[in-house]
Image (cartoon, rainbow, N blue to C red):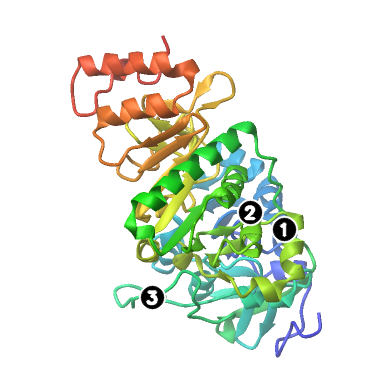
Amino acid sequence: MSGRLEKTDAPVDAATAAAHVDPDAVVAVSGFGAVGYPKALPLALAADDRDLSLTIISGGSVGKEIDTALVEADAIARRYPYQARAAAREAVNDETIAFQDRFISKLGDEVELGHVPAPDVAIVEAVAVGDGWFVPSLSIGHTVAYVRAAEKLIIEVNDSIPRDVGRFHDVYERSLPPNRESIPLEGPADRIGDSRIEFDPANLLAVVETEAADDPYDFREPSATDREIAANLATFLESELERCSMFDDRIALQFGVGSLGNALMGALSSIDFGDRDVYYYGEVFQDGLLEMIENGTLAGASATAFALTSAGQQRLFDDIDGYSESIVLRPADLSNNPALIDRFGVVGINSAIEVDLYGHANSTHVDGSRVLNGVGGSGDFNRNAALSITTLPSRHGAETSCIVPMCPHVDHSEHDISVVITEQGVADLRGRSPRERSRLLIEHCGHPQFVDDLEAYVARGETGGGHIPHHLGSAFDWRS
């Protein structure tokens, strides 16, 4: 651990540090994309014999130490803004844990302005700590905002992660509204900040040493459907590069996290970008981007977290010097910032559970009721991207269409979605009326198994007229 603790009090064990956390505390934790979150402290809290009723606020998804161990210990009463573990999901859906889903770009502000409960303590993971500063580990997320908002701070210093990961960081702190300045970032991979996050030394309760590793991602092998969706995306992007002058010199892309997103990145290798500079500007950096950095496809990449497999993470660690020339990690209020997404003309590519015939998308709730993970950053990019693309299979399993008459829950409205792509084809919805959208989605994105029933639903709806011709009597029981 030599060289990681500079001018700090002696470290303590996790159980001692956990005793500083009140049983009903609001706890803000670092972490995003299931990396960079504290591990020893949550496990110590899960083993605590006190009756805990914690509110946990993270930046994005975290690991099993928080969303499994603490949940199973019945230690979490309230959770913001995203969860991606089975134990947490079950507790949220049976209301054992009160949960509110939030857009990522605004969450830091909401914490600092008191729109959600103010944190009593921030617990963060670092690779180094000094007198009034620490260097975050593999994600930044909303750690800056949480440290500023919390009354107290506990830092876990993780020796399993190379200290040099700080070379990726670009920590830039913004003032709060109404005195907020513009962000002086001119290019997607430019740097304007520092590798450190600063804090008031008087707030530091404890430093804990750990060597616990993040759970690496395990992306499944792309299915035949994934590959067909990816091929359709590549064909569409190639035509858009030729059609739209906005992309004459540069294109910036964003992909949602997950196996499909990782597969879609692989399709980019088949695209002839010509002399254009290609950037990634999004939330998470996945394995598919490493290859694009190495083969020269990407001029640079900006994210707030590394969401890598174990092999991808080792690949990153083995060449931090090389990768840090092209990759930047920023706070989430920059990685997901609406003004920057607009400024860089980002093409946002995200998935959904289902899309309805008039262009609304549901990305969070099965049957409109049971939440999966959360909206994450898809709302930030769908609403603010120069071009928003929703990719999904045309059906789930053998009996469930992913193109439906009416979404029972809407995360992204018809005004947010420009293009829908399934393995069946591409529906370009730009400039189309609702009736035109319905026909495009059925013809180009619907699975053949469901096309007749979808067309029958549209016909029923049109008998009643209206701008969006729904037949509410069969909107959710539409198959003839």
Instruction: Specify the quadrant of the image occupied by residue 372.
Output: top right
Q: Residues within 10 Å of mark 2 (few under 14, many from 20)?
A: some
- Real-space Cα separation, disc 3 to disc 2, in angstroms: 29 Å
In the rendering, at what x and y percent does residue 383 appear? 35, 51
Furthest residue toward bottom: 7
**Nearer to us in this view, 44 or 346:** 346
Mark 3, mark 2: which one is toward the viewer?
Answer: 2
Residue beneath label 3, please? 183
Type of residue at label 2?
Gly
Report whether residue 48 is seen.
Answer: no
Q: Residues within 10 Å of mark 1 (few under 14, many from 20)?
A: many
Residue at x-position 34% and y-position 76% = 182
Q: Which mark is residue 288?
A: 2
For the residue labelled by badge 1, is the local secondary structure a helix, a strand or a loop?
A: helix
Residue 420 versus residue 258 in the image, above or below = above
Report whether residue 415 is seen.
Answer: yes
For the residue labelled by badge 2, is the local secondary structure a helix, a strand or a loop?
A: helix
Residue beneath label 1, please? 312
Residue 412 versus residue 29 in the image, above or below = above
**Nearer to us in this view, 434 or 264:** 264
